[in-house]
Image (tube, coloured by chain):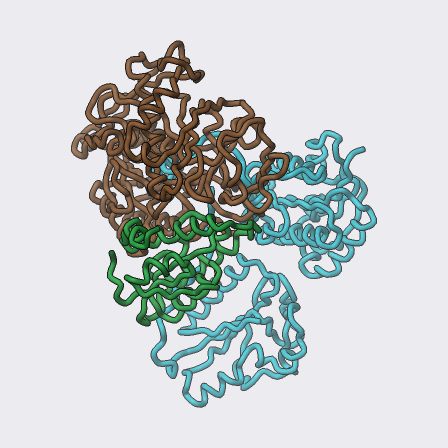
Amino acid sequence: MKLELGFIKINDVQFSNECAVKDGILYVNPEEVKEYVYDYDDVKQFVKSISFDIAKPGESVRITPVKDVIEPRCKVEGPGVIFPGVMNHKVDTVGSGRTHVLKGAAVVTAGKIVGFQEGLIDMTGPGAQYTPFSKTLNIVMVCEPVEGTKQHDYERAVRFAGLRAAGFIGQIGKNVEPDEIKTYETLGIKEGIEKYPNLPRVGYVHMLQTQGLLHDTYVYGVDAKRIVATLINPTETMDGAILSGNCVSACDKNTTYHHLNNPVVAELFEEHGKTINYVCNIITNENVYLADKQRGSDWAAKLAKLLDLDAVIVSEEGFGNPDADLIMNCTKQEKQGIKTVLVTDEYAGQDGKSQGLADSDPLADAVVSGGNANMPVVLPPMDKIIGMTDYVDVCSGGHAGSLRPDGSIEAELQIITGATNEMGFNCMSAR
Amino acid sequence: MKSPNRIRIVTNNPLVKQILSDWYTVEYYEDATYRDILVKVRDMVYNGYELFTHPMAGSVKPNETMYKSIVVGTDQKGTDIDHCKLMMNALITCDKFKPTGVQYSDYHYKDFQLIDYTLLCGALDFDAIAGLSKANM
Amino acid sequence: MAYRVVHYINQFFANVGGEEMAHIAPELREGKVGPGMAFETAWKGEAVIVNTIVCGDSYFAEHEKEAKEQVIAWVKEINPDMFIAGPAFNAGRYGYACANIALEVKTQLGIPVLTGMYEENPGADLKDKILITPTANSAAGMRKAAPTMAKLALKLMKGEALGASCEEGYMPNGIRVNFFEKERGAKRAVKMLLNKINGKAFTTEFPMPNFDRVEPGKAIPDMSKVLLGLATSGGIVPKGNPDHIEASSASHYGEYDIEGWDRLTPEGWETAHGGYDPVYANEDPNRVLPVDVLRQMEREHKIGKLHRYFYTTVGNGTAVASSRKFAEEYAQKMLKAGVQACIMTST
């Protein structure tokens, strides 16, 4: 499957009466966005208000609590729409043709979903180095629920609101000439063997967090709890085939932005045709039921074998029980002769002395770490808060008194959105 | 929903008791802490009861939430070493996290109950939302 | 004011002599000696070696207590800002001495310490207790080791926070520290995968805990026919300890003949182990090496025969690598003699 990504470099974002991209500046009319977002029953019914704001890199701004981050993109050529299964319920297969990307911009949804809430983004200061979203121009949507709305209804509504907003804003770039076009193509089985007979066949076992409210992932709109391990073309992820329904934990859950910009996909494509034949992605879930974990890892191994893969990269999402899936995926692949590299993060305690993973096996001899999520950090007060800081103490990584009277925050690294991403998005690691 | 035969839910979550008692055998320990539930289930597993769900469901941390529900078998089948390891690691992981000292309000408790409940429903293929509606919640 | 450092080296690096001079007792010298020059060069005046302590490797191994006492006494008086030992590269007894004397200084005097050696040096067992810089396995590695150690030492003297082990140049010591790599994780993963696929070396960023699991051997259905061997890490040796097995950190094992001994007697046998109160073992060595019970079992045909040679060493503070080496060797001897099962007693 072949996809062209047209990157439109966005250097600034401003609210305006019009929606356009001119000279690298993205002009957005928040009223138009709001109108489009509200033109959807769930949002109409459950979201009382959405307030828009912009946070730029270097500004003394803190966004919290963060639900999701989405990159504005739109389909320009080829079947389907961006975020299939969500936007207009269209589920046509995506990942081919051409897609435009407003590179440098991001939509951030914020606001309370439940009484405890995850995620914080600092646009400057020591906290900024730990999140990729201190470097994006963020259009923040702070949402508020209609009184009495059930949490699961509200979660869905906010999720759709963010995706609709990103889809609408992405459309602004539809007719803009991209600054850079990159082509990504994976080949069919037979074609791949013929074209790259001597290159090792590599796949990507992509684990998705799928456990319950605030812990879900959607594939073409399907709750991934319900799927058995299956194949997906890497370019499909670039069009939003996989979307985040999850907020926990802030540091190691994959935002929709991470799914769209999957770093493992990107790095495998860099080597594709040169040192490897990048065959496809195998997506599998991280269910709570133990038999599901076994079935999932057995199935991923089965698919890898069927595809005659020589090696796979396995990435994780979330904390605790997914470590079991990670190790199962690793050992089952290794035992059938398929080499693995695992990407994960660690919870080594605040002093760094604890065993960082909840499961282990000597076969897991090639591991990339996203760092220790328990590391204590102190974040200075910011001039402006977008959202509310009520939840800081109760976030994962927070404690009583985390939010100090002067507005500074003392908490664990896991409170920062994307800090220890387990797809290898960041440069941070630990030894 | 998964069959309720030969399994029980070990929990300290009143929401689970309230909604799932109609469908499953719920062993409800009102005063148990999160860690107490882990210890109880560990002892059951050591004594040969089968473990059906992972003790560390969800990414909400052990020192954040106070509720835990785990599905365990009702027949003594013989001790499974891997399940013992799982429970041991769950306790080691739980003890890694320092108490936060946060004073929770009622809505915090309710939300943590809800998350634990939906994690459990996900594991049992039980329609979480239908369950809530039926209980008028 | 420059920081003041005391440097510990062995007889070889002090140019006193080789193995034949390994018995020399500790000597206190003024200023830097031998490799100390490399450290001072790297420090560019920020720190100086005020004294060097030279000690023979055999002396330290055989008189550990006295050696430690003397070194501590000197260091206490000098009161330096830092204590550096080695680097020992692959020299086992030197590495053991460096690591243990550094630990002693740290524990007794609270002075920052640092040593360096090859990763497989038995002294490296202490990497969780003191900082150890990994070095090459021969003195040819001095050119790289000295500046790394010097830089790290300066940080320790200044009390600066340390970064991750791979950044600063110390063996991972079980404390995970976050730091920023140059490349993002996904890229590092793909590189690691390519190396793995192509059979090239790679280093994992997260070493799995080492459980050192041993597959249990097959059960023996009929013990009455078996030639049973006996081994111990409890240090039982013939009276007088003729082969001088060390009370701690044993450098070798002993093979002794119990043919004709119906039970071990306090006149003929004793314990060399320095890690437990020897009174009861010396009163009745069978408590540690159960010859008496096994002879009884021979008579009752519960076992076939007790093998005439038993193997003994002292487990106290002995390096894991050494223990492994001893057992690999004497297991072969046992196998050659037809031993089918072995009881290992430990204390």
The answer to whether A151 is drawn above or below residue B109 in the figure is above
Furthest toward the bottom, the residue is C300
Q: Percent from the top left, x then y, of residue C245?
A: 62, 67
Quadrant where the N terminus of chain B is found in the figure: bottom left
Shade representing chain C: cyan
Q: Percent from the top left, x then y, of residue A173?
A: 32, 17
> Is residue C58 toward the left or the right of residue B25 in the image?
right
Q: Which chain is brown?
A: A
Instruction: Give whichever of A183, B137 is nearer the camera.
Output: B137
Q: Is residue A396 visible?
A: yes
Instruction: Give whichever of C175, C21 is nearer the camera.
Output: C175
Identify which residue is drawn at 29% across, 16% down. Answer: A174
> Is residue A155 toward the left or the right of residue A387 in the image?
left
Quarter holding residue A410: top right
Furthest toward the right, the residue is C77
Q: Percent from the top left, x then y, of residue A35?
A: 33, 23
Identify which residue is drawn at 65% across, 82% down. Answer: C283
The answer to whether C26 is drawn above or below residue A261 in the figure is below
The answer to whether A285 is drawn above or below residue A240 in the figure is below
Q: Is residue C20 visible?
A: no
Shade representing chain B: green
Q: Percent from the top left, x then y, of residue A284?
A: 29, 44
> Is residue A47 toward the left or the right of residue C287 in the image?
left
Identify which residue is drawn at 54% across, 58% down. Answer: C320
